[in-house]
Amino acid sequence: MLEKDYPGINMERTGKWLRFICRFEKIPVKGLCRQLGLSCPQSVYGWFKGKTLPSLDNFYALSQIVEIPLDALIVNQEEEIPKSFCKKIGLQNVRLIRYRMRFTF
């Protein structure tokens, strides 16, 4: 059986992406803590700085809150821009930019 190499999660870019999404959706850190049942905002700030990642439960809850698929919240080592920047719409499958952001690499 051949082994596949899978890219790891880029914590720094994932954190920046999560922070951007929350700002774009106008979700304050305290509001996010309340919705996720977190007692202190340090966890969320750790995610945004790329020092830690949310637990799977919190990642899933966050994806439901912002209405973005769970895998689109994660930026892997090989990605430059998350797939959810573009959205297919209409019968002609036109791609529109949903979000504008530049990652600082």
Image (cartoon, rainbow, N blue to C red):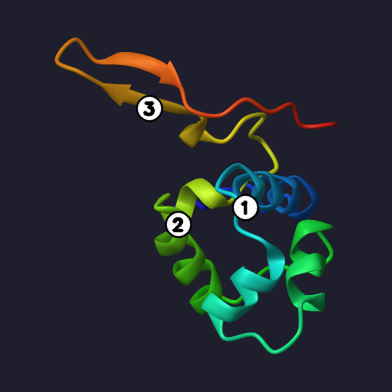
Using the image, tell me which numbered label, if any, was put on residue 22. 1
Front tag of 2 and 1: 1
Which one is earlier in the sequence, the residue at label 3 or at label 2?
A: 2
Q: Which residue is mark 2?
A: 70
- Locate residue 97, reporting x and y percent: 48, 20
- Locate residue 47, reporting x and y percent: 75, 64
Quote the CA–CA distance across marks 3 and 2: 15 Å
Q: Do we see residue 105 in this rendering?
A: no
Using the image, tell me which numbered label, if any, was put on residue 83. none
Q: Which residue is mark 3?
A: 87
Residue lying at 61% horizontally and 70% vertically, measured from the top left: 31
Type of the residue with mark 3: Lys
Residue lying at 54% horizontally and 51% vertically, measured from the top left: 73
Type of the residue with mark 2: Leu
Query: Within the image, what quadrant is residue 60 found in?
Result: bottom left
Residue lying at 67% horizontally and 29% vertically, measured from the top left: 80
How many marks can you see?
3
Nearer to the camera, 84 or 31: 31
- Under circle 3, the secondary element is strand
Q: Do we see residue 20 in this rendering?
A: yes
